[in-house]
């Protein structure tokens, strides 16, 4: 049964979407540093106080899409009724992101902006770390081990998340000459193939 969304929640979602849309447009047009919260509010005809109810800072506005993707990923990983393993969920996240980059020029431009804007290097790294921790927890759950004691899962998750980011950067630096989907899937498969033996891994033994 689909949960009914209240008018208040609909309005909140609409406001957040409008704020992130305008923020993206301004960030791409004039850069992150030159864009102010006042400008974003003026375009949306709201006060800064209202904006700050939805986003804590300009940084959060800039990484809003990634934050939403992280929240959805976390919910899927920790869903008690999930029927997909964590690796499959991660693969779907990677493919969805690649599809957006390939089919939506605005999204691609914004992704390039996020990865090249020096002031967002810290927030971007923090988001990737959260993705890694979430994936690590999912891998541990699937293996039936304690996530906090699972060094193998933590290392594997870090390689998958940061390997994906490295592959995306490689693809962009080479002007998209390779097939992006193939490149990202090959990255996942290569990591999986080389680190598939959890029980035989020295990392598993060293953790105990």
Image (tube, rainbow, N blue to C red):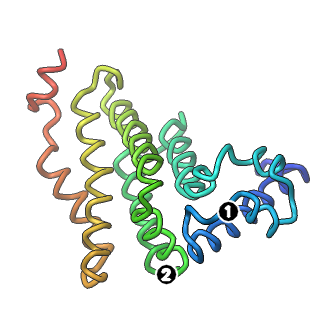
Residue designated by label 1: 20
Secondary element at image label 1? helix
Please tell me in which quadrant of the rendered image residue 146 appears: top left
Q: Disc number at residue 94?
A: none
Residue density around tag 2, few if under 14, some if 14–19, many if 20 or more, within 10 Å? few
Question: Which residue lies most toward the right here?
Answer: 7
Please tell me in which quadrant of the rendered image residue 40 appears: bottom right
Residue 200 percent coordinates (x, y): 9, 31
The residue lying toward the viewer, choosing from 27 and 98, is 27
How many discs mark residues in the rendered view? 2
**Residue 26 position (above or below residue 14):** below
Q: Residue at x 8, y 28 (%)?
A: 202
Image quarter of the C terminus: top left
Secondary element at image label 2? helix
Left or right of 122 in this view: 4: right
Label 2–label 1 contact, CB within 8 A: no
Residue 189 percent coordinates (x, y): 21, 58
Q: Residue at x 28, y 50 (%)?
A: 160
Q: Residue at x 68, y 43 (%)?
A: 56
Q: Residue at x 37, y 57 (%)?
A: 91
Label 2 – label 1 distance at C-alpha:
19 Å
Kindly report which numbered mark, 2 or 1, lies closer to the viewer in this rendering.
1
**Residue 188 position (above or below residue 26):** above
Left or right of 43 in this view: 74: left
Residue density around tag 1, few if under 14, some if 14–19, many if 20 or more, within 10 Å? some
Q: Disc number at residue 103?
A: 2
Residue 3 percent coordinates (x, y): 79, 48
Left or right of 38 in this view: 195: left
Residue 142 percent coordinates (x, y): 35, 34
Question: Which residue lies most toward the front here?
Answer: 34
The residue lying toward the viewer, choosing from 190 and 43, is 43
Mark found first going from the N terminus, 2 or 1 = 1
């Amino acid at each position: 049964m689909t949960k009914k969304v209240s008018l208040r929640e609909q309005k909140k979602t609409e406001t957040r979407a409008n704020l992130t849309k305008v923020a993206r447009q301004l960030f791409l047009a004039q850069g992150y540093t030159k864009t102010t919260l006042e400008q974003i509010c003026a375009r949306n005809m709201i006060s800064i106080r209202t904006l700050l109810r939805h986003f804590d800072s300009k940084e959060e506005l800039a990484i809003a899409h990634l934050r939403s993707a992280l929240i959805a990923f976390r919910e899927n990983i920790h869903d008690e009724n999930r029927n997909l393993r964590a690796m499959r969920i991660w693969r779907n996240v990677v493919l969805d992101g690649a599809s957006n980059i390939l089919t939506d020029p605005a999204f691609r431009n914004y992704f390039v902006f996020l990865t090249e804007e020096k002031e967002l290097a810290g927030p971007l790294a923090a988001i990737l770390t959260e993705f890694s921790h979430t994936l690590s927890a999912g891998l541990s759950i699937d293996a039936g081990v304690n996530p906090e004691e699972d060094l193998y899962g933590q290392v594997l998750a870090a390689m998958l998340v940061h390997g994906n980011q490295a592959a995306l950067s490689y693809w962009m630096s080479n002007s998209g000459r390779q097939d992006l989907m193939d490149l990202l899937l090959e990255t996942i498969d290569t990591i999986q193939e080389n680190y598939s033996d959890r029980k035989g891994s020295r990392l598993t033994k060293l953790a105990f």
